[in-house]
Amino acid sequence: MKKGNQMILKQILVILLVGVAYSGNLLSQNTSFSRGKMLTKENAIEDFGILHSSLINYHPAPFFYVNEVDFTTFYESQKASITDSLSEMDFLFLCRKLVSQIRCGHTQALPSDNWFASVKGLDNQIPFEMKHVEGKIYISNTVDDSLDFQINDELISVNNRPVQDIIDELLAMETGDGFTQVFRNALIEKRFGIYMLFLSGIPQEYVIEFRNSKGEIKQTAVQPTKKRAVELVKPALPDNLNKILETSWSSFSFDSEANLGYLRIRSFMEKKEYKKYYKQVFKYLKQHPNSKLIIDLRENSGGDFRHGNRFLTYLSSEKVLLNFERPGKKRTENEYVKYSGWDKLVQFAFAIKPRKYKAEGQITETFTYRPKKNAFKGKLYVITNGITFSQAALVSSHLREHGAVFFGQETGGAELGCNGILTYKLVLPNSGIKLDIPAYHVKSNSTKGEFGRGVKPDFPIALTVDNTIDHTLMEVLRIVRNN
């Protein structure tokens, strides 16, 4: 959740999609080249120390989920493992493992700009996408129909390595809020292509072992590609749900027979039309007395806190408070951590704003949102999954506190709060590895949340292999219509 900036998930996906034109066989098959620059032992240790110090001094709550002694012990053990020169990708894994210890999904290390430039324009992606379903890994999409494996075939191994071993290695360096794994699993699904690039560079080929729909185990070799996965046709809305409004980030439909609204919100990023849009949605609901409303926040990774909280004013009978804080103590600063010019301006605005709450050792900012006259007073149902994160998880937390019924999977964002609002940028001097560090700890209004976990569904709905039908929505509609 961060004002005026793209979410972490969207940032890395955009990076992946830029510049995939072919630029020659010389580089496209060069595995060592795609491992990045080589770092001396001394340079790696220096960068690792800067990373450790920056996390402690700039992160607003580095020891919220891990105590300082354990964090320092882990840092020292990882530093001791640097006994020789190593590649940027190997060092990136060390950095990401250290970052993962603080269990903050908004804090993430990315490769250097030079590394991204080195793989730009190459055939560098594995030619399929994957998904987790009930403890197994399946192929969720492919770049074309010419491959031996198909969508929904089970993935067994890549280059003779069990795919679950690959996933476990990726989980060890993945970030997420608290102790839930759902966001980490979801990110690995979204980023599987680039993560394979982190792990193996650009190999001559990938040897894929899979189980097809007949239960036969087969093996095939595929080459890295510049092609993107084919865009899948989205499942049609179930019968009786008639679309009333639609934007690039949301759609609103209504079942007049069941007196039931369905509002899908894919993002809370700042959009010019969101105020007018919500006004129309809730005016429509006001014209249908005793209506019920399903809010679908699946795949919503968050966005602007103003957007999310103004949305809540249509669902609350009392003021909505947003509180976020940072330590008031002096920190040991370094020259490698910086704010953007816009973030500097916003922090200055926070500094001159009167503060509602004062606590020793903390600087707390508070924003108050008043309920709308057209606030919805009917029964609320919410659908979430592992990508429901940041501002979307905070919205979920507020709705849970005020009696909404939840379906689907646990949110990826923690129910009791997260980190965000503004972001520091760290660039390590020797490796060039980049890090986003949030500046504030955001406190939710929840009194019911479990420490370190997301908002859990009242009605868990397992994911299915078949994605041609929205089975989750179908099940929610069945339960809600049958009350």
Image: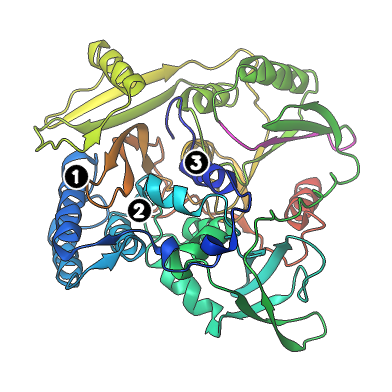
Q: Position of residue 99 (x, y in %)?
A: 29, 55
Residue pictured at 41% horizontal, 68% vertical = 32
For image coordinates 49% across by 67% down, the residue present is 30
- Badge 2 crowding class, 10 Å Cα cut-off, few under 14, some 14 to 19, many 20 or more, is few
Q: Which mark is residue 451?
A: 2
Secondary structure at numbered mark 1? helix
**Quadrant including the N terminus:** top left
Read off the magenta span. 257-268
Query: Which quarter of the figure has residue 113?
Result: top left
> Do tag 1 and tag 3 residues touch (Cβ < 8 Å)?
no
Q: Residue at x 73, y 63 (%)?
A: 142
251 or 256, which lies in front?
A: 251
Q: Which quarter of the figure has residue 86?
A: bottom left
Give amino acid for label 1. Ser
- Residues 44 and 188: in front is 44
- How many residues crowd around disc 3 within 10 Å: few (fewer than 14), some, or many (20 or more)? few
Whichever of callouts 1 and 3 sits on the residue coming sooner in the sequence is 3
Label 3 sits on a secondary structure element that is helix
> Callout 2, which amino acid?
Phe
Judging by the rendered image, the residue that carries numbered circle 1 is 54
Q: On the picture, is 42 further left or further right than 217? A: left
Foreground label between 1 and 2: 1
* Spot occupied by residue 362 in the image (x, y as percentages of width and height): 17, 31
Which label is found at residue 11? 3
Q: CA distance from mark 1 to mark 2?
A: 25 Å
Instruction: Tell me how far mark 3 sits from mark 2, CA to CA.
Output: 28 Å
Disc 3 or 2, which lies upstream in sequence?
3
Q: Does residue 25 belong to the magenta stretch?
A: no
Q: Nearer the viewer, residue 82 or 379?
A: 82
